[in-house]
Every structure is written in C-alpha cells, then in structure tokens.
Image (cartoon, helix red, strand yellow):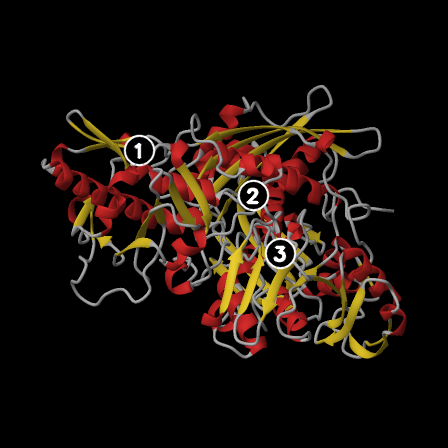
Amino acid sequence: MGAHDMIFSKGVSRRDALKGAGALVIGMALPISGPNGKVQAQAAGAGPPPIHPNAFIQIAADNSVTILSKHIEFGQGPYTGLATIAAEELDADWAQVRAISAPANAKIYANLSLGAQITGGSSAISNSYDQMRRAGAMARALLVQAAAAEWGVDPKTVRVSKGVISAGSRTAGFGQFAGAAAKLPMPLDVALKDPKDFALIGRSKGVPKLDSAAKSTGKAKFTIDLTEPDMLTVVVARSPRFGGVVKSFDAAAALKVKGVVAVKQVPSGIAVYGKGMWPAIKGRKALVIVWDDSKAEKRGSEEMIAAWLEQTKTPGLSHGAHGDAAKALAAAGSDVVETAFIFPYLAHAPMEPLDGFLIWDGTTAKARFGSQGQTFDQGAIAKVLGIGMDKVEIETLYAGGSFGRRAQPVSELAVELAEVAKAMPLGTPVKLVRTRDDDIRGGYYRPMTVHRFRGAVKDGKIAAWSSTLMAQSIMIGGPFEKFAAPDGKDATMAEGASKLLYEIADFSCDVHVDKSAVPVLWWRSVGHSHTGYAVECFVDQLLVKAGKDPVAGRIEMMAESPRAAGVLKAVAELANWTGSKAKNGRARGVAVVESFNSFVAQIAEVSIDANGEPKVHKVWCAVDLGVAVNPDVIKAQVEGGVGYALGHALYAEVPLVDGLPTVSNFNDYRSLRINEMPEVEVVIVKSTEKPTGIGEPGVPPLAPAVANAMAALGHQRPSRLPMVRKA
C-alpha cells in the first residue's frame, strides 16, 4: 500500500497544494498496528522512503483543515465521514474543517478493501477508518512537537482541543506551527484515542454535513454545470437494441442544424457535436442511421422469464449447501412449499445522468466528471488515447447520485468520452452528456432474475430449504471474471441466498447463468436487492406455515447470527411489535438482511388502498454497522434507502419487447413521489465493532417487509416485482 502524508500548506491554492508547489509536504510510511493500541510509523529516512506519498490533510495559515477524500461524494456522505475521522484524532474544531476530492492516483488513494481507487460496496468509511485516524493522529503529534520546540516546553504538557494548541498560558492555532511541523521527522509511534474520548465520532450535534450548504445554495459544481470557452457539447446516437452496431449513416441533415459543428462515428455510435445541448440533440434527431442488429438481443423479457422459470426446475451450479436438502424435501412429500419470484431489469436513474468533460492536447488528457472508479476510468482514457495513466488527470466532481451506475468495470462512459475527444482536433474541449432517456434505455441494468424456492416445515421448524436462481452475471465474461468468478461462480448473484442468517438443517442454493447482450451492472445493494426479498418473503411464508411469530420465529434460528438477532430485537422494540395481525386496515411485516457486513432490520406498516395498491405508512429501522461515525448521515442514508427501495419495489421495471426497452424517463420508469414517502424512524444499535457501510444496506429489507405486511392483510406476497404492474 502507499504511504500516508499530511500537507501543511500556507494558503496555497488547491491545485498547487495537490502538486506540492508552495506547500510543505511531510512524507510518512503507512503505519502498522503495534502493541498497546499504538500505531507504529516509519520514521522519515528510516528504511525505503515512500515512492508515492499519500496526501490526506492540508493545514493552512488561516487554521483551516482540509481533508482530501479519495472517495467520490454523490450524496452518501464520505466528505463528512472521512473528515470526521481525521478531525477526531487531530482534535480540530469542526468549524475549521473542509473537504475536497483527491486526485486520481491509485498508488496513493486506493480503496484498501478493493485494491483500486473506487467507491463501492459501501466501503468508503470501513476501508478508511484506521487510515484516516492515523493520518489525523500523525498530524496532531507533529503540531504538538513543533509547538513544544517553539515554546521550550515538554511535549507532554502541550494540549490540543477544538483546533487550539496550548501549554500553560500560551495558545495558538494550527496554522502557526504548520511550517515548523513540516520539517520534523516522523514520530515512531502515535497513540489513537480511546473511543470513550471521542468528541466528533458518534456525534450528531455540531457536526453538520460539509457539502450541504453548497448543494443547498447551488454553489456546488456538478459535471452538468460545466462550461468552458469553446467547449462543444456531445450526444451520441446508439443502437436502440443491445448489441446493435452502425451499418451506415447520413449526417447531411444533422450538419444543417444551426449550432452543430461536427458529426463523427465513434465505436459506440454516431457523435454529434454542438455549441450547446439543444443543437446537439436536434442534430442527433436529424441523423439517418441504418443499424446492423445481427448480433443484438432480440428476446423480450417475457420470453426470457418463461425460459428461466423452466430452467430453474433443474439444479444449477452449487453456491452453498449443507445437509441433504433434496432428501429432506423428498421425505416431505406433498407438504413441500414451492414459490417462484421474478425480478425485472432495473435502471439506476440517478438525478444527474452520466456526463463528463475532457480536453486532449495530444500528450495529456484532463478530465472532469463524477468518477466513481478513478483507477478504471483513468486506465480506460489512457488506453483510448495511447498514453500512460500518468498522463491522464481526473478531477472528481460532485455527482448527482449513482447507485452503482458510475462504476462500470469497462468504464464505458470514460471510453466514450475519450473517443469523442480523440475524434476532434487536438485541444477541443468536449462535454459528453447522456440524456435521461439515453441512460434509462442504454442498459447497464440491475440483472433481471428468477428465483425458485422449495421448503418444508417439520415439528414447527423449517426443516429443509432449496433455492435455484437464474440471471445474467455481472462478473462472468467481464474484466473482473478472473478475480470475482475464477471457478465460474459469481458470488454476487446469490449473495444473501447462498448463506442464510438462519440455521436450517438441510440447505442448498444453486445458480444458472444466462448470457445476453443486455449490459448489466451492480445496482444499489447488488445481489441483496433481489435475494433479500426472495429469502425474507420465503422464510416468512414458512414461518406462517409453522405457526411462528415472524420476529420470534426468526430469532429462534439466529443462534449463530447474534448481530442480526440484535437488530431484529431492536426494531421490534422500536416499533412496539405485538405481531403481524391486521388491525384497523393496517398490518405490519418484518425483514432483516445482512449486506456489506452491516445488519438492518425493518418493520413496515402497510394498508391496501381502493385500487388494491399497497400504501406504506411507516417504516421502523434498526441498524448495526459497528462504530457509528456520523449518526445523522447514517439515518439519512437509511431514509434514502427506504425511499429508493420502495419506489422501485412498487413501480419500477425496464421491460424489453423484441429486445427494445419500452421505458425512457420518469414518466414511465416510475419512481416514488414525495407524498408517497412513509415516515421513517431509525435506531442505531451501539457497537464497538469497526465501522461498516450504510450507503446500500438500507435497501434490501424494505420490499420484503412490505410484502410480508401485505400477506398479513390477507393478500398474496407479490411473487413478481414491481408490486404495481401496468396492465
């Protein structure tokens, strides 16, 4: 891994600070855990120096503390979370703390869980917790040493609190000693705080989100806001069918549109360059294109689903098993319960569709966009332009949501951005923009999936469980296959289903993989987005057959899942659970899911309206994600997860007819409306475990909790999503 570095800058610009120009840079090797809770660090000059020093903290002459975030900020809160961790150990005052994006450099800013600079898997806080604590502690230690030397006192007598350094009657801000601190050798060890002494971590009061004000006032800059002198806006006409390619095209009419500067063929389609968005869109509409669909997907969703339902009647490749489920189910005879669940393709539909800015001068490329996977995007741009990754600069901007969409293994946006820049004269600034229609029709969907379950109950207990699912794989056939599916098993397909939270004596889970030209991608909570629903609906169904209370029955099977049982007990207490029985036209359903090493249980209170549609009135949530760094951010993410999950569970799907997507925007790709948002109450279970993620884990339990409440109302649990489907 790379080494830590703190930058103590004297009021230099962000660009200069990042380059080290005019800044005082301190090299520091990556600390490793030592005895007695201390962190051992390589002293400056001791051993091989770090080749690529990290830069996480800047301290300016005005006492401001700027934290560089290696993770993109698209609403999930890493700017605030990472800054909180570093500021805690630094003993900074929150009012002096700022955050900016780090440059693209995997040797410095790699996600320690994923091995590249990428934000995903709800790992931003978990992979950075120790790293940012140590960076903050190192910076504090150096400031203390510098102050002690200047004042001629023992460093042990120097105190730091809320951004003020003091010893006796003397006080100073951080900026006063930044320069001197930069000249000191690295301390051999620093002690991290005892959690009982935390002043920022775990607090809500006095720790507001760092990016809220800029976003609320419109000062925050997103890619969609970018404009540069002589910049051309680019839209690309792509095949309406997945796998289709250009056979021929006529650009004559497009070139006659006022404001259209050029039309170029690129590998993904036909690019139209305009002096603004409207000329580019108008020019694209004027194109005449003949498509070659010989290798395109021409099946419709219904054909694929029918085939998959049939295929799941036979076992696939085993993803998990113990006992003998087949034997136990055979012994159950006619008492076997069998259920199938169908999940549609889902678009990510972020509020800001994909876009990016790039300028290529023939030697270097400078890109500005909401890059979720900087390492992959940097490499993709470099490959298209035939240069080294070190010649590609990416400035990561705020992004208006992602839900997985901006992190593609093949970096298709970055590739297309480089292609449209390469097709124009050197030095032409280009901004590539996808319309929402482009993005929703353009694929990279959550895979359509079919689950088939068979189970048996004996002596009031779930005795046997077998599940078979079929879908496309995100990993197999892609660049991550050797790493993520070396044995032909894509674990993300069955995560949450291949190993349960419940002890069941005879269990099996197997998977069939379909191949299609429809591009698929991880979607908020990845496999858990469908396995959470299927597993929690089926376990509820079997518990009803066994005569068990949905909460108590689950807990009885959770001896080996104490944290899952803990959130289940906590949410039951929060909601004053007395059972799922309907009362006054309402009933409650429950679900609990572990995803990304975080545990979330939810109870949903539901009624059925006059149109037969579910109305969710309130959702209670209990979460256990280890140390809660920012409680307000955690609660906001859970609330957002509930709304995102509910809208998609009720209304969203991308049906294919003859291979063509039949939805295009929020008018037909239905999302939750503000008046449909339920009240949400969240409790965070106290924990001393290392922090895990919360950007995704709030999503999976919501839909099954709603479905289980519908069953308690006397309706069938929906076996096909969305729950409200068009006739």
The residue lying toward the viewer, choosing from 178 and 144, is 178
Query: Helix, strand or loop at disc 1?
Result: loop
Q: Position of residue 405 (x, y in %)?
A: 62, 56
Residue type marked 2: Gly
The residue lying toward the viewer, choosing from 47 and 529, is 47
Rendered residue at 44%/51% (across/down): 14
Q: Which residue is mark 3?
A: 405
Task: Say few, some or many: other residues with alpha carbon within 10 Å of mark 2 (under 14 / 14 to 19 / 20 or more).
Answer: many
Q: Position of residue 599 (x, y in %)?
A: 47, 41
Task: Find the distance from the CA under tag 2 to the CA under tag 3.
Answer: 14 Å
Residue type marked 3: Arg
Q: Which residue is mark 1?
A: 163
Task: Find the distance from the CA under tag 3 to the CA under tag 1.
Answer: 39 Å
Rendered residue at 33%/64% (across/down): 52
Q: Nearer the viewer, mark 2 or mark 3?
A: 2
Q: Is residue 566 above or below residue 495?
A: above
